[in-house]
Amino acid sequence: MRIAQVMAGAEAGGIEMFFERLTPALAKSGHDILAIIRRDPARAERLAKTSIAPLQFDFGGFFDFLTTPRLRHAFTCFMPDVVIGWMNRANRHIPNGRYKRVGRPSGYYALKYYRDVDHLAYSTHGLVEWAIGQGWPANRVRCVPNFVDDPGQVTPLSRAALGIPKGVPLALSMGRLHQNKNFPMLIRAVPEVSDLHLLIAGTGPEEGALNALIHELGLKERVRILGWRDDGAALRATVNMCIVPSDHEPFGNVVPEAWASRVPLITTDSQGPAEIVADGVDALLVQRRDSSAMARAIRRIIADPALADALREAGRRKFESEYSEAAVVQKWNDFLHEVVT
């Protein structure tokens, strides 16, 4: 099958990173792939390392009159069977043609950007049901999940280099520093857990407010914001648990990433995690916006090594069966063949 993948997203983010994983994975599974991205030399370099040489267009605002004709020319030359448009901006520019169009929204976003799309592919069943509730035809929307990389054997980072004392419990939270992620709730849980140290990996508009909260609570020695990191697997190998404190999380790649790394997981009951985790089996689920409930879950994992081990192993089994590359690419292949037939 000839598949064009069109991504006009941000420099960093969960769905953007999944695009970078899925594109070469589809090529490895036997498809001919054309990748088109918003101008981003770093993304282009990462894709080139997987033998994908993307085209780069502007994907500007409403006064960008060049991207759509350039896409049309690229599709005329490539002759795709399917064009997958990732998120709103890409789909706004993609022209119709003699191919099937698939939209991949990243969450609960207005469907007006997808009115010319043949099928929608969401990462969770909850998103599928939401789209149907908005009037989208049920026979034209599917749940096709994300996968994350298997980290294999990873050497932990030096705690001393991270400024972490020996022997203390260490938690990791990763994601864009945005209000939806509710890192303040997690930071407020830290004083309720003796000796807990917390690493937050990410960048975003809330960084200043988070640093101010850390200073206000006197947690500068126990909470560190690391910025954007490319060594997520090594960070996960270094900590005692991973935490997802989000108020709003349509899927949450950090969930299967923790499972893949065999790290005990705590997550709020935000939309995506609440659907895919089994509370007390492969993760601990806590109520959103409740820092005391989060602190109690953290203390449970610290106090009960058997529970931590059980969460670790059950999570790894779920990763292998549902969120590994092999499992998810098969689901994408089945979906794409359904689209073109």
Image (tube, helix red, strand yellow):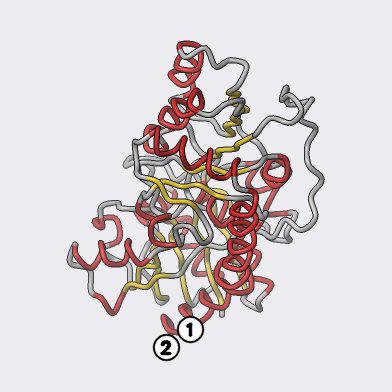
Direction from residue 297 to residue 236 in the image, left or right: right
Give SS at disc 1.
helix
Frontmost residue, 134 versus 165: 165
Q: Could you tell me the amino acid type at mark 2? A: Thr
Q: Quadrant of the C terminus?
A: bottom left
Q: Residue at x 37, y 32 (%)?
A: 179
CB atoms of marks 1 and 2 within 8 Å: yes
Question: At numbered mark 2, what does the secondary structure look like: helix, strand or loop?
Answer: loop
Q: x%, y% of residue 140?
A: 30, 75
Q: How many marks?
A: 2
Depth order, front residue of 294/215: 294
The span from disc 1 to disc 2 (Cα, nearest Å) is 6 Å
The image's mark for residue 337 is 1
Residue drawn at point x = 35 percent, y = 67 percent = 125
Crowd rating for badge 2 (residues with CA inside 10 Å; few <14, some 14–19, many 20+): few
Report if residue 236 is visible in the image.
yes
Depicted 241 relative to depicted 339: above or below: above
Which residue shows up at 55% across the image and 70% down it?
A: 322
Q: Is residue 50 left or right of residue 333?
A: right
Q: Is residue 244 above or below residue 97?
A: above
Quarter that holds the N terminus: bottom right
Q: Look at 57% across and 45% down and name the residue there.
A: 301
Can you give x and y, in whole percent of width and height, for residue 61 in the image?
Answer: 36, 40
Q: Quadrant of residue 116?
A: bottom left
Q: Which numbered tag is attached to residue 341?
A: 2
Q: Is residue 119 above or below residue 309?
A: below
Q: Amino acid at mark 1?
A: His
Residue 283: give x, y in percent of width and height. Answer: 51, 55
The one nearer the camera, 331 or 88, is 331
Q: Quadrant of residue 35?
A: bottom right
Inspect this view and state whether residue 65 appears.
Answer: no
